[in-house]
Image (cartoon, rainbow, N blue to C red):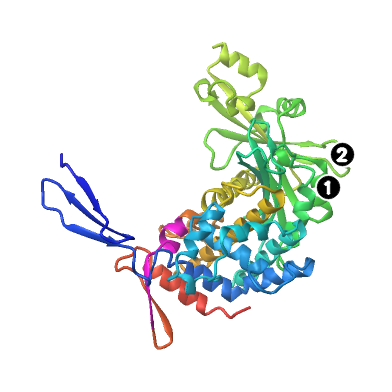
């Protein structure tokens, strides 16, 4: 095993000389951070060009100012510059206000970004506290409208059917002085973010931030209305899907009033168990894309529902006792109590786990169940928001400021989705025949390129690309490393963005 030693000497301030000694001769390496033309975030050119082409900063400024003036003086950063600068920081991997300094110190990459003069952390924190809930909703709406405009330029069909997914996620915080935070049912001091996403476009249309112990049902109808308002004119039929947290008559009544179809999971209660017992054995059919699962159908009218009885889809899956787990395992809650006791006593080796879906949709029950099962795609947007775009932390002390941070996260997630759409548009289109299967939204178009890239992937290969900036003939030149894996895609996406007129 080779023995290495790291020797450091500092002949000058800001410079270090390193030498490694081993069994073989090692080169003496001199390191100095003194190149003003290098940037480690050259890919922010793509998001910057996208923001400029869609006039996102101006859109957000106009929407915020229409609600209420953001500042009395014109000097300094506007609301649009603030939120977009935060979004650029999050796309680059930042998840705290202090990470704004990473972009501030990247002077070489400043001309590439949409907001070249990134605000300092203290200024950003002060400005975030000024934004009201109405202003932040307007800012998110302006971002979704920019996405709709881009869809039109990319030739995406505005009249296609729309799937809206609704879900909530918690963000744990640790400062007991966090305004609006509370302990949730798991005992975590947290906030709750509720999101509505457009599944086919991979974008967030509406968002709310509440305390960790707040219920999802009271705000769900308002959140649905906000999402519907962001859809483009002439959009296709809309369908909503959600988990059991959104099983409430108020949401279903709002869906019926807005002519929106819905499919929501139903909590496992006595009424559901009785419904499953009444299904004859010949009423079960194999489920799609879930080996060992079966689907049956009956009707159910929940309390408060004043319309026709709804379709109740029941899925059961045969489980081995070893699959049930121990303690408070989630899978145990899918098994009727009597069967669970028999399994734990060793009287049976297999039991059925059940799930229930209530819907007003027409069509084959197995296809509807498969479609509703795919609501898990919203988890990818939540992963983008939390692991890729800064929602893993809500770093400020007031609820209003943290709502502003969340709005910047939504902008970052939507920018990633828009860049993925542009990337997909640059790829050669495969010929489509009449017998070609219909692809779902996250299914690969071919063996290499999926229809959406996660924020972490976009950052790793497209945003965090090292580059050298040079100037000649009044033009900027960006030189990427030879052999950079995604260099050709960065060039292709930028060329495609340049073809989009400023909207």
For the residues bearing labels 2 and 1, Cβ distance under 8 angstroms: yes
Residue found farthest to the right: 306
**Marking on residue 340:** none
Helix, strand, or loop for circle 2? loop
For the image, the number of numbered tags is 2
Q: Is residue 286 above or below residue 200?
A: above
Q: Residue 429: image x %, image y %?
A: 47, 69
Q: Is residue 112 above or below residue 262?
A: below
Specify the quadrant that holds the N terminus.
top left
The residue positioned 42% from the left and 61% from the top of the image is 464
Q: Which residues are magenta?
A: 457-471
**Marking on residue 304:** 2
Relative placement, left or right, of 430 versus 62 is left
Q: Is residue 333 visible?
A: yes
Q: Residues within 10 Å of mark 1 (few under 14, many from 20)?
A: some
Please give the residue where the numbered disc 1 appears in the rendered image.
Answer: 253
Q: Is residue 200 visible?
A: no
Residue 79 is drawn in which quadrant?
bottom right
Residue 271 is drawn in which quadrant?
top right
The residue positioned 61% from the left and 18% from the top of the image is 340
Q: Residue 361: image x %, image y %?
A: 73, 49
Helix, strand, or loop for circle 1? helix
128 or 237: nearer the eye?
128
Specify the quadrant that holds the C terminus.
bottom right
In magenta stretch: residue 465: yes
325 or 308: nearer the eye?
325
247 or 479: nearer the eye?
479
CA gap between label 2 and label 1 equals 9 Å
Which of disc 1 and disc 2 is earlier in sequence?
1
The residue positioned 16% from the left and 57% from the top of the image is 27
Residue found farthest to the bottom: 473
The residue positioned 51% from the left and 75% from the top of the image is 497
């Amino acid at each position: 095993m080779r023995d290495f030693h790291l020797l450091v000497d500092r002949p000058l301030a800001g410079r270090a000389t390193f030498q490694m000694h081993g069994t073989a001769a090692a080169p003496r390496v001199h390191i100095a951070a003194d190149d003003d033309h290098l940037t480690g975030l050259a890919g922010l050119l793509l998001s910057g060009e996208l923001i400029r082409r869609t006039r996102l900063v101006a859109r957000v400024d106009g929407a915020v100012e229409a609600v209420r003036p953001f500042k009395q003086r014109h000097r300094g950063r506007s609301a649009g510059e603030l939120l977009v600068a935060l979004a650029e920081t999050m796309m680059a991997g930042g998840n705290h206000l202090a990470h704004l300094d990473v972009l501030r110190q990247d002077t070489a990459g400043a001309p590439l970004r949409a907001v070249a003069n990134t605000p300092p952390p203290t200024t950003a924190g002060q400005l975030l506290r000024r934004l009201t809930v109405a202003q932040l909703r307007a800012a998110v709406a302006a971002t979704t409208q920019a996405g709709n405009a881009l869809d039109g330029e990319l030739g995406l069909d505005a009249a296609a059917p729309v799937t809206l997914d609704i879900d909530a996620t918690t963000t744990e915080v640790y400062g007991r002085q966090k305004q609006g935070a509370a302990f949730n049912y798991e005992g975590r001091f947290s906030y709750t973010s509720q999101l509505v996403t457009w599944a086919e476009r991979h974008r967030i249309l509406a968002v709310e931030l509440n305390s960790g112990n707040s219920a999802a049902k009271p705000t769900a109808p308002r959140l649905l209305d906000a999402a519907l308002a962001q859809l483009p004119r002439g959009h296709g039929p809309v369908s909503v899907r959600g988990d059991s947290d959104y099983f409430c008559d108020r949401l279903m009544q709002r869906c019926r009033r807005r002519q929106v179809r819905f499919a929501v999971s139903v909590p496992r209660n006595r009424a559901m168990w009785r419904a499953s017992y009444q299904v004859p054995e010949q009423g079960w059919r194999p489920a799609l894309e879930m080996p060992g699962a079966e689907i049956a159908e009956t009707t159910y009218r929940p309390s408060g529902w004043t319309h026709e009885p709804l379709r109740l889809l029941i899925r059961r899956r045969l489980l081995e006792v070893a699959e049930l787990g121990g303690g408070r395992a989630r899978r145990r809650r899918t098994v009727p109590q009597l069967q669970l006791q028999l399994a734990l006593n060793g009287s049976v080796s297999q039991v059925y786990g059940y799930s229930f879906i209530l819907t007003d949709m027409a069509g084959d029950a197995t296809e509807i169940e498969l479609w509703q099962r795919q609501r898990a795609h919203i988890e990818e947007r939540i992963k983008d928001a939390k692991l890729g775009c800064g929602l893993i932390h809500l770093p400020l002390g007031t609820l209003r400021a943290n709502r502003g941070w969340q709005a910047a996260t939504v902008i970052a997630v939507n920018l990633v989705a828009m860049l993925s759409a542009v990337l997909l548009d640059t790829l050669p289109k495969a010929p489509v025949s009449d017998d070609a299967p219909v692809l779902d939204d996250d299914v690969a178009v071919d063996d290499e390129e999926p229809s959406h890239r996660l924020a972490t992937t976009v950052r790793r290969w497209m945003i965090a690309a090292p580059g050298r900036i040079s100037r000649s003939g009044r033009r900027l030149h960006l030189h990427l490393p030879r052999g950079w894996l995604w260099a050709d895609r960065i060039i292709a996406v930028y060329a495609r963005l340049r073809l989009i007129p400023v909207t």
